[in-house]
Amino acid sequence: MLAQFAKLSLQRTTLRANTASVQSIRLFSGNGNIVPPSQPIDLGNLADNPGAVTERLRLGRGPGYGKGKTAGRGHKGQKARSGNGPPRPWFEGGQTPLVKRMPKRGFVNQHAKKYQPVNLERLQHWIQEGRLDSTGITMADLLDSRCIHKIEDGVKLLADGAEEFNVPVHIEVSRASQKAIAAIEKAGGSVTCRYYNALGLRVVTRPEKWGFRSLPKFAEPVKVKDKEWYSDPKNRGYLADPAAIEAAKAEAKAL
């Protein structure tokens, strides 16, 4: 029995020596030079860096660990109950919070649309810098040139800088103010307001996402107010009669 134990110890010593010689070849310093280990490396002394591993707290496992019974929560009270996470930001200990005591007025329209505004001064600057081609500008061109940074429900053309606007531009947007329409037509351009739903906006701005598939058809407005707005020649809607639009342009020039 003693001879077998001595033989096994000799085999382990030889294995450790061979392992140390192999592992010492694989150690490198910061500059790439081979650095021999300070002590033989084997499975018995492999360990992580000090502080890299923290022992998990074992709560409620008896008094010997120090966190048994009440598991560090003490006796009773709100902080001793299960499921006691951080309170809500407006929690005031049980009394009626301020957000409930104050009256509420107004509402948020769930059907409201958010249009990205584009003013005439910014549009003229983009054209003069060569970022946009004035012969035909769409909402996709405005987005690709970073004149606008996103399209939520469309683009609305506004009239800031209408007094200095002098570029003949042909543009298609979702909405446009009357003053902006007048300024563009005075400079020799034209405005077309067209309705797009969410799918239509994706088709206009990112048609490459459909690949070889055929593009979806553009939807017509469903709400009565939208139909009336895009059928009004004063708004230069795409549903309006072209003859009525020309008559509205002539009337605007006469004024």
Image: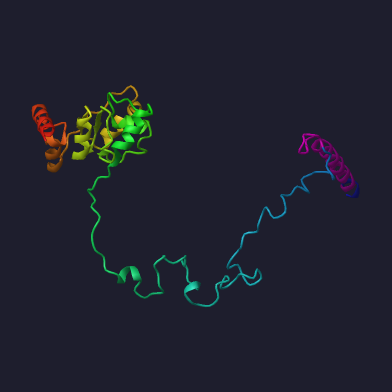
Does the segment drawn in magenta span residue 249? no
What is the tally of numbered marks visible in this picture? 0
Q: Residue at x 78, y 49 (%)?
A: 45
Where is residue 59? Give x, y as percent: 58, 66
**Horizontally, is 160 left or right of 146 in the view?**
left
In the rendered image, which quarter is residue 213 located in? top left
Is residue 68 positioned above or below 227 on the image? below
Most common secondary structure along the magenta stretch: helix
In this picture, which residue range is highlighted in magenta?
5-34
Residue at the image position 18 percent from the left and 39 percent from the top: 178
Q: Is residue 24 magenta?
A: yes
Can residue 191 be seen? Answer: no
Q: Furthest residue to the top?
A: 212
Report the residue at 35% width, 33% height from top.
125
Q: Residue 4, image x and y in percent?
A: 87, 46
State the image coordinates of residue 19 (x, y, percent, origin top left): 81, 39
Q: Quick one: 135 or 203, which is closer to the camera?
A: 135
Query: Quick check: 62 above or below 252?
Result: below
Looking at the picture, tell me which residue is in the foreground, 231 or 107. 231
Residue 220 percent coordinates (x, y) = 17, 34
